[in-house]
Amino acid sequence: MQMAMMAWRLLWPFVLMGVLSCVALEIHPEESQYYAAEGSDVTMLCQYNDTLDRSGYIIWSFTRFDAYKPPRIFLFGDGRLHLDLDATMKGRVHFAARDALNGDASLTISNVSRSDAMTYICVVKKLPEMEEKKIMTLRVMEPPSQPICNLQEEFARGNNVTLTCLSFHGESPLTYTWSKISGNQVLPANAVVDSVRGTMRLDSIIEQDCGSYLCTVESLVGSKSCELVLPCPDVPEAHMSSALLITISITVVLVILAVSIITAGCLWWSRKKTGQHNFSENVGDVPPPSQWIPKKKEILPSLHYEAKDQTVTMSA
């Protein structure tokens, strides 16, 4: 029995260390690289398991290589807060959570500037045996400016055209994307997009390629967009309604029918007039009806003279 008690006393420190290791501090998430646009707010996460008491302290230290004394923030377990910050950071740095000793020691910096781009270290210490730290870096970048959309060639049926999109300010990497925001909202199958230069080429365009297109330029700290409309002015039939097309077709048929009727009437009248003229000419060559009647033979009077013994009759 005594041997067992002595063994337990010898093993107790190791058991305690194992128990403590099970509840040891663990800072999460593991994200260690942060990007922020100039003038924006950024929160660097330093969250830990809340299984321990409030004893200990939290320290945020900022590694600024151009400063003799790096800025720091101290938060003690009894609630005392000590800010050892320079003039450029005062009033812009604070804990994200209301109670940083309750599992969330994340830090928020408002209206960030280029001078805030440096290495940050979050240290959480609970009891003498437990301490954990997390190292993070902050990169402050210029966001992309409003891009300008343009069309290089004339947009006409069958042509090859190039749509351009360019942001003149913004820190790389910049990525350009194009999308169609009208009609079926699907990019044409013949579209070739250059995500680095911001161009989109359309080969052998057709009426369905007309519409509104949106270009978006995006960086690690923001995005901006511009819109370009392709109205297809040279293909007005693409905008005609079916009713208008039917009306035009009927009108054309009626005009053709009317022209055909008029032409036929003119031909008939011309032939009729020509026939009468020929008849009159033929009639003029024929003697008048009075000349058609054959002349009666004149009966000459018979000359009778008596001879002495015979009678002679002379006829014409």
Image (spheres, grey):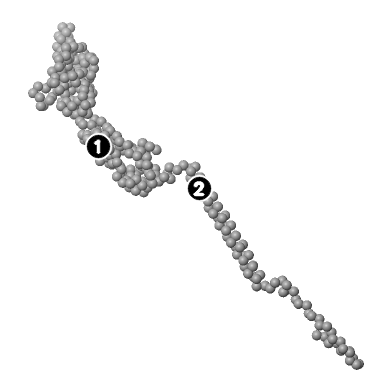
Residue drawn at 21 percent across, 13 percent down: 52
Label 2 CA crowd tier, 10 Å (few <14, some 14–19, many 20+) = few
The kind of secondary structure element at disc 1 is: loop
Q: Residue furthest left?
A: 68
In front: 281, or 156?
A: 281
Residue 168 position in % (x across, y down):
23, 37
* Residue 240 higher or lower than 84, as above or below: below
Residue 238 position in % (x across, y down):
42, 44
Residue drawn at 33 percent across, 46 percent down: 154
Quadrant of residue 297 within the rendered picture: bottom right
Of the image marks 2 and 1, the number of the one nearer the N terminus: 1
Tell me the residue that label 2 is attached to.
Answer: 249
Residue drawn at 12 percent across, 25 percent down: 64
What is the distance, in whole Å, between disc 2 and disc 1 at their CAs? Answer: 50 Å
Q: Residue furthest right?
A: 309
* Residue 75 higher or lower than 220, as above or below: above
Residue drawn at 22 percent across, 29 percent down: 37
Which amino acid, by three-letter code, is at mark 1? Ser
Q: Which mark is residue 167?
A: 1
| Count of picture labels | 2
